């Protein structure tokens, strides 16, 4: 499993448009899978695995919704360094993955196995926590309004329309969530579904202060603290 930064010639990343050369219905999801495979090949060259993005969509290409939790196989899953993330889908679909290695459960790592909060232990921690999912706390499609999936991961327009649902790679309790959850608050601890991001535009906001949103006029996937990364899982251990 890896948290990915999709850049490919754009220093701000892809934003909410993950088509990666794919076209037609379901292009965002297929493109995200291709990004997973491309990044996995740089980190685990010759791995030979089939990779799937942990993303939900309203239309997977056949007119039917797709739930992220149903895309990633049955487990178990490990990070780049071989540490357990979760044994089963039931264990995975929790606020933090049940049974995860204690070294990563509160800071799910990137594609190199490095923590997102402090990838370089010689440097200050960074506010880099938001990860795209489009999913609710159980890994299923969060909402049928396309703003919560950036039109099924096909748009990176810098407007205030988009509100992609994101999880937190490390706990961020007590931040406003929105999206109709109890009391207008969400679980900032959830790696799957913590809050609605500010927009679908490409952009990042990574500082050494845990200052939260917004930064870039409230229109990018990175405004709340991140760069529009997302998680990828191999269908086989």
Image: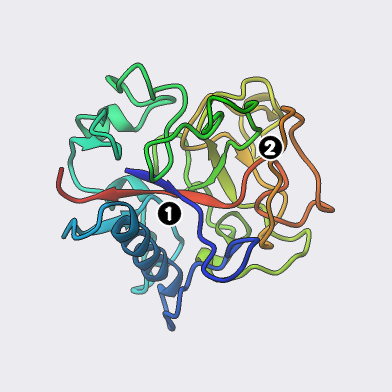
Task: Give residue 11's position: percent from left, percent from top.
Answer: 63, 63
Residue 149 lies left or right of residue 95; in this view the side is right
Task: Give residue 223's position: percent from left, percent from top.
Answer: 72, 47
- Disc 2 target residue: 178
Q: Residue at x 61, y 24 (%)?
A: 172
Residue in the foreground of this view, choosing between 162 and 113 = 113
Q: Against 1, is 41 above or below?
A: below
Q: Secondary structure at mark 1?
A: loop
Task: Give residue 104's position: percent from left, percent from top.
Answer: 39, 24
> Are there few (<14), some (14-19), or many (20+) residues within 10 Å of tag 2?
some
Q: Secondary structure at mark 2?
A: loop
Q: How is the image coloured?
A: rainbow
Q: Residue at x 74, y 33 (%)?
A: 212
Q: Residue at x 61, y 50 (%)?
A: 227
Residue 230 lies left or right of residue 37; in this view the side is right
- The part of the image, by quadrant, that contains residue 38 is bottom left
- Disc 1 target residue: 56
Q: On the rendered image, what quadrant is the N terminus found in? A: top left
Residue in the foreground of this view, choosing between 9 and 182 = 9
Q: Against 134, is 12 above or below?
A: below
Determine the CA span between mark 2 and mark 1.
18 Å
């Amino acid at each position: 499993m890896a948290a990915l930064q999709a850049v490919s010639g754009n220093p701000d990343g892809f934003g909410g448009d993950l088509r990666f050369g794919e076209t037609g219905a379901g292009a965002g999801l297929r493109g995200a899978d291709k990004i997973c495979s491309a990044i996995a090949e740089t980190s685990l060259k010759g791995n030979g695995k089939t990779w799937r993005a942990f993303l939900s969509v309203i239309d997977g290409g056949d007119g039917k919704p797709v739930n992220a939790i149903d895309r990633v196989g049955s487990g178990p899953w490990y990070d780049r360094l071989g540490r357990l993330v979760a044994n089963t889908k039931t264990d995975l679909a929790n606020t933090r993955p049940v049974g995860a290695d204690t070294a990563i459960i509160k800071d799910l790592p990137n594609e190199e196995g490095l923590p997102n909060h402090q990838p370089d232990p010689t440097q200050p921690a960074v506010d880099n926590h938001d990860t795209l999912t489009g999913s609710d706390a159980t890994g299923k499609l969060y909402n049928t309004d396309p703003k919560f999936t950036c039109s099924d991961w096909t748009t990176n327009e810098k407007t205030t329309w988009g509100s992609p649902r994101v999880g937190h790679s490390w706990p961020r309790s007590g931040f406003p969530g929105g999206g109709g959850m109890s009391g207008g608050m969400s679980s900032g601890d959830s790696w799957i579904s913590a809050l609605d991001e500010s927009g679908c535009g490409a952009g990042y906001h990574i500082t050494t202060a845990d200052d939260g949103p917004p930064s870039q006029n409230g229109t990018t996937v990175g405004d709340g603290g991140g760069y529009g990364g997302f998680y990828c899982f191999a269908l086989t251990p």
